[in-house]
Image (cartoon, helix red, strand yellow):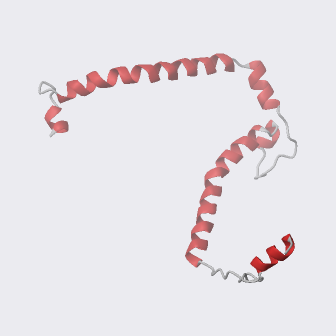
Amino acid sequence: MNAQEGAGAFAIGRPTIKAARVRYLDLGGLILTVVTVLAAVIWAFPLYWAIITTLKPEYEVVEPGVRLWPRDLTFDAYIHVLVNTKIGIWYLNSLVTSGAVTIMSPSWAPPAATRSRSSAFPAGPCFTG
């Protein structure tokens, strides 16, 4: 017996045609999927609109009517912001402010919680039961 005959002996008991899987249309699942996709499009549209508006020249932004894609694609708004404003300083200011708030907030929470639990705190019984 060679290798092919040995493999053929094992294949005799197996069906050669796989049974077709029947899938039924789940109407509830289809409706839920369509509603979810519509909600996602409605949620994402303002983000799309904001990005596309930054890529339009000024005369296209202020003209009447709605265009979903700019006629003249331009990066002038980005160049203007990077060259003619102090966006680096503004970004650094936001970074310092958010970092300071992140560091200071956990240090203020325990004393405030302890104070609110004390009986000398006028509103203590209202919050503590």
- Residue 41 percent coordinates (x, y): 65, 57
Determine the image quadrant of residue 54: top right
In this picture, residue 111 sits left or right of residue 81: left
Residue 51, horizontal then vertical, whole percent: 72, 41
Residue occupying image coordinates x 82% and y 37%: 57
Q: Is residue 125 left or right of residue 67?
A: left
Residue at the spot 84% in from the left edge and 76% down from the top edge: 5
Residue 63: horizontal and vertical position, in percent? 78, 45
Q: Is residue 58 above or below residue 32?
A: above
Count of numbered tags:
0
Q: Residue 43: x, y in percent? A: 61, 52
**Residue at horizontal 63%, vertical 80%?**
25
Q: Which one is nearer the viewer's eye here, 65 or 12?
A: 12
Q: Nearer the viewer, residue 95 or 67?
A: 95
Specify the quadrant that holds the C terminus.
Answer: top left
In percent of the image, x 80 and y 26: which residue is there? 79
- Quadrant location, the N terminus: bottom right
Instruction: Name the outermost residue toward the front.
Output: 1
Above or below, comparing residue 42 to residue 107 in the picture: below
